[in-house]
Image (spheres, rainbow, N blue to C red):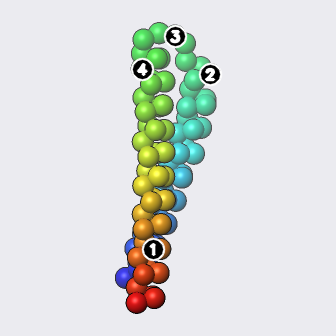
Amino acid sequence: MFMQIAIGAIGIGIVLMVGYLVIAQVSGSLVESLGDTESDNDTKDALASTQSVVFAGFGLIAVGIIVLAAFGLINIFK
């Protein structure tokens, strides 16, 4: 049971890391080509918001793994 949850959390973490790399690359290439029009600023804001969501996902994965490890240790030492 614990191993399945840990593998699932690691899988989600890998997906989030790949998503972050994709968003970072798209953001880096788009920001250089975008100007200062309203739609370009909206695009920059959307990319920043997406990166914030991915960062929040990283935090949730880290907390989940820590809680999973703690729960596993508690059950081992019972």
Q: Residue furthest front?
A: 78
Q: Which residue is mark 3?
A: 36
Residue 6 picture location, percent across and down = 45, 73
* Total numbered labels placed on residues in the image: 4
Marks 2 and 1: in contact by CB < 8 Å? no
Image: 14 above or below 44: below
Query: What's the residue type where badge 3 is placed?
Result: Asp
Structural distance between the alpha carbons of marks 4 and 3:
10 Å
Query: What's the residue type where badge 1 is placed?
Result: Ala
Q: Which residue is mark 1?
A: 70
Q: Which residue is mark 2?
A: 32
Image: 14 above or below 38: below
Structural distance between the alpha carbons of marks 3 and 2:
11 Å
Q: Which residue is mark 4?
A: 42
Give the residue drawn at x 42%, y 63%.
64
Near mark 3 (Cα within 10 A), the count class, few <14, some 14-19 or many ≥20, is: few
Asked whether 70 or 38 is in front, the reply is 70
